Image (cartoon, helix red, strand yellow):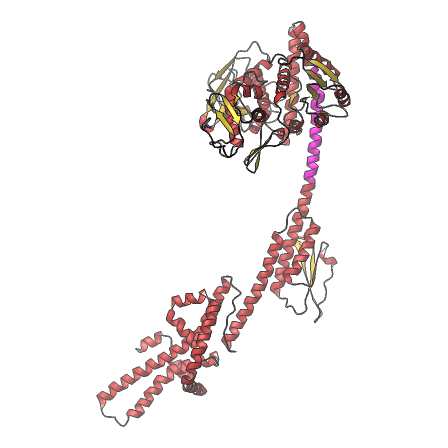
Amino acid sequence: MTEQERDHQGWPTPESDLIAATEPPAHDASADARLGLAAREALAREAAEREAAAREALFGDGWTDDLDRGPDRGRDAGRGGGLTLALSFRTRLTIALVAASIIPLAGFGILLLILDPAAGQGATLGRILLFILVVAAISGILLAYLLAADLTAPLRAIAAAVDRASAGDLSTPIVVPGEDELARLADSHNRLAADLERRNRELGRILQAIQSGSPHDSQDFIAGRAANDARTAFGMIDAYVLLVDPSDIAEEERIPGESLPIRAVLRAGTEDLGVLVGHLPATRLWERADQDLLELYASEVAVAIRNAQLFARVESQNSQLLELDAAKDDFLRGVSHNLQTPLTSIRAYADQLGRDRPDRRLGIIGEQTDRLSRMVRQLLTVTRLESGALHPRSEVVALAHPVRRAWEALAVSDVPLTVDDQSAGWLAVADVDQLDQVLWALLDNALKYGDRTPITVEIAPDPTQNRLRLTISDAGPGVAEGDRGRLFRRFERGAERSADDGSGLGLYVSRELCRAMDGDLVLEPHLAGRGAAFSVYLPGEPPEDV
Amino acid sequence: MLSGPGGHETAPRILIVDDDPNLLVLLADQLRSDGYEIQTARDGDEALRRLRSSWPDLLIIDMMMPRMDGLSLAREIKGRADLPIIVLSAIDAGDSKADLLDEVAEDYVTKPYHYPELRARINRVLRRLGDKVPRQSLVLGTNLTLDLHRREATVGSETVQLTPTESRLLYALAANLGQTVATDTLLARGWAETEDADPSYVWVTMRRLRQKVEVDPNRPVHLQTVRGVGYRLVMAGPDSGRSDTAPPTND
């Protein structure tokens, strides 16, 4: 082995010299150690076996991993651990350094003394010298290596434990026998791990407590439970959550030997909702980290309480809204009843009179009554739309039928209607009543704004999207460009349209009704020769043969 | 059948309850001229008094009445006897009470009523008298329970809502459980007041119903198609898979 290689191994010879010079007792220790070596061998083997078994039981896989990485080193460490049980870390380190530096030099010196009388046999002497130098160096390195392995074993055990701790396993303590620096290091690691584990446990209980909450709980219930949970989680003697201004609760003084008062303010955002106070057993250590944890818990409790307050407020508002909604429904039902009942009578008597004595004027009374009654319904529908209370009862229907029915209801004789039915048996899925309102409004619109030009209704399926399109168009002037965007808004009519008829609700209500039926109502783009064109889209079903 | 109270040996008796005398007189006139025997009542109390002396075949009840409203009256009557009821009201479909009506009334007609439509509905309800399904759950198998009076079906563990027409069709099928009901019969049951309905209404509605009540709509267990004839509703038993006589179709 060359000088270079030794350097590479990290054993700086000059410094070893220094230690050897300044600490002569170490030499003795080294000698003691070597003298007792044979005697200790048996003891050491036994101790090594015991320790290996203990390590196997304690470290399990972690140690096996180490073995996999370097089986030789693992075994060496196992043996080394037992080799110098009683010696302190510093002593062992010293022995190692001294051994590494002294032994080759000492060996070399002894050789020189032995071989001095035989001086003169130059060539042989040189060879023997070289041989002995090499043997001494190798034995020195070997001894140093064994001692180093002995030293690094506990260090490796500590490193592995820290790795385990950072990976989350805090329950396995490090076993380093003795009282030396390494044992103390292991001890403090074990204490740190135990502290961490305790706080983790507390944190776990806190999280569990927080998660078990429900927004339906009242704030008093949450406060009571939070106090209880805090008591269990932190091992407190007593704990209270007081939902008052924290400054109203005076801080307790700490009296040595008596139970330890602790407190944390329940703070949600910038708002102080109350304070958590309690007592710990006098023996319990309460550190900064514990206080932090308690404050974290208090702030979580504060958030839960604030949520409960908000939830209770929303709940009460909801029930108020429901009451209002029911009251509105009652009111609307009354309005509808009071308006529709007389209209029903007028309509029915006009019909009856007309049957007995046909008269065009009676027909007009009937039609206008119908119109009025539909407008009442439209207004009611608008009010319902606002509360989102449309419950379409969708049934299948062939669209051509309701179109003809709505047209008949309008009783127009001077405007031609063409129904171009290309539905090929497709049926729409729609609430017949709501669809009737939509068709009536669209046809009425086409009559009003189409300058009494012919009206065309085209019905066509769109099999790719499983829907039907129904387009109602006239040959009138169409919709002015500026009106297109606002046509479907509430109470809007086209600017150029007269304000003397209609509520301005027809298109708005119709679109909303279509959407409630999972369909839509759109204004088609301008086409040469066509006036205004509106398309109703509704879910469709293909025909089926038996 | 749609034009009059045919099918009855004596004229059907109808009790109309409405607080508006104009309407009461007029509707009574209209129905009498079509051959019905009509009694009238001005409010709930009068109606209940009349019921003590004789039971009509059908009641037409106004929803909004002073003191006892139509809904309470209908509940009161249903509590005593399962008389068919048509509610006449200005209520619109968005009203929260519209759904409540289904529980107590066989049908409802909105004001202002269209007389021919009202008459068609009266006749349909009267015709259905013979095949009433009890107001209780009908368990057809582990995966299907029908609560038609609530317009609900329980498929597996889920509750699905049925439309009025769907529950009417299921009524008709359940009343003839295991037997084939002709498509035309179902059409008449489901769409009595829609003169222009055709058999495709039945086909498509049945397909949609199957989507709702069958666990696997492509392999119907309960709602089977009898090709060229009609449909039938069957219980799912050990022999429910037997399909040699009438194979369920995958449509």
Q: Which residues are magenta?
A: A317-345
**Residue A424 x, y percent position in the rendering:** 46, 20
Residue A256 higher or lower than A543, as above or below? below
Please indicate, yes or no, whether residue A83 appears anywhere in the rendered image: no
Nearer to the camera, A317 or A347: A347
> In percent of the image, x 49 and y 18: which residue is there?
A458
Residue A541 higher or lower than A240, as above or below? above
Q: Residue furthest bottom?
A: A117
> In percent of the image, x 64 and y 32: which residue is there?
A387
**Residue A292 x, y percent position in the rendering:** 62, 61
Nearer to the camera, B96 or A295: B96
Q: Residue furthest front?
A: B239
**Residue A238 x, y percent position in the rendering:** 70, 62
Residue A44 higher or lower than B114, as above or below? below
Name the image quarter holding residue A415.
top right
Nearer to the camera, B44 or A274: B44
**Left or right of B157 on screen, residue A143:** left
**Left or right of B42 on screen, residue A271:** left
**Residue B107 x, y percent position in the rendering:** 64, 23
Q: Main secondary structure of the magenta part?
A: helix
Badge count: 0
Work out which quarter of the rendered image holds the N terminus of chain A and state it. bottom left
